[in-house]
Image (tube, rainbow, N blue to C red):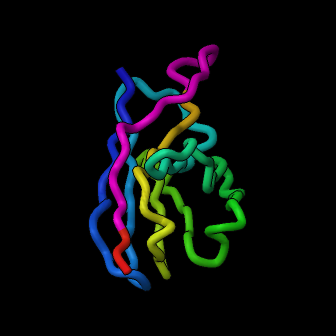
């Protein structure tokens, strides 16, 4: 009953920018952490950034200074601004959210992913 839907992926040249969005909907009591993973072909899925409900953020070293995560709690939406993209950023980007559907139940939900392709 909870869905996460990503949007905003696409094809971009090196040095370009994209903005990803991920909206959570359904039976939501509250949302704690929200974030983004990515998975390149033949690679493991890796955590790249997350943000708490209070706005504290984490970034993996490879994206620091280039990617910015933000969220709109009123819209249950998390955003990822991707700047200075390079071909190594090519991957499927997945959002996740730690969601409580009632005061006692907390679990992680995942989006289906959005493809980001960076050409040189």
Q: Horizontal and vertical percent for residue 31?
A: 56, 37
Task: Work out whether 72 lies above or below 84.
Answer: above
Whether residue 68 appears in magenta in the rendering, the answer is: no
Task: Work out whether 3 lies above or below 36.
Answer: above
Name the quadrant containing residue 56.
bottom right
Magenta-highlighted stretch: main secondary structure?
strand
For this rendering, which residue is in front, 105 or 19?
Answer: 19
Bounds of the magenta span?
100-117
Q: Horizontal and vertical percent for residue 67?
A: 55, 70
Give the residue displayed 38% in from the left and 68% down from the top.
Answer: 19
For this rendering, which residue is in front, 2 or 91?
Answer: 91
Q: Horizontal and vertical percent for residue 14?
A: 40, 81
Quadrant holding the N terminus:
top left
Name the quadrant containing residue 119.
bottom left
Q: Horizontal and vertical percent for residue 2?
A: 39, 26
Give the residue displayed 58% in from the left and 33% down from the top.
Answer: 98
Quadrant holding the C terminus:
bottom left
Q: Which residue of the protein is positioned furthest toward the bottom in this rendering?
A: 15
Give the residue displayed 47% in from the left and 76% down from the top.
Answer: 86
Q: Which residue of the protein is positioned furthest toward the top in this rendering?
A: 104
For this rendering, which residue is in front, 103 or 13?
Answer: 13
Horizontally, is 78 left or right of 106 in the view? left
Whether residue 108 appears in magenta in the rendering, the answer is: yes
Horizontally, is 9 left or right of 109 in the view? left
Task: Work out whether 99 lies above or below 66.
Answer: above
Give the residue displayed 33% in from the left and 80% down from the top.
Answer: 13
In this figure, what is the number of numbered marks? 0
Horizontally, is 45 left or right of 77 in the view? right
């Amino acid at each position: 009953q909870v869905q996460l839907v990503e949007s905003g992926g696409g094809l971009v040249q090196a040095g370009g920018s994209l903005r990803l969005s991920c909206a959570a909907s359904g039976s939501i009591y509250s949302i704690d952490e929200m974030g983004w993973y990515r998975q390149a072909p033949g690679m493991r899925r890796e955590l790249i950034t997350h943000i708490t409900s209070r706005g504290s953020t984490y970034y993996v070293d490879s994206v620091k200074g280039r990617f910015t995560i933000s969220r709109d709690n009123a819209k249950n939406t998390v955003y990822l601004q991707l700047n200075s993209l390079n071909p190594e950023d090519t991957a499927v980007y997945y959002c996740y959210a730690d969601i409580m559907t009632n005061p006692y139940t907390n679990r992680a939900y995942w989006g289906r992913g959005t493809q980001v392709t960076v050409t040189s």
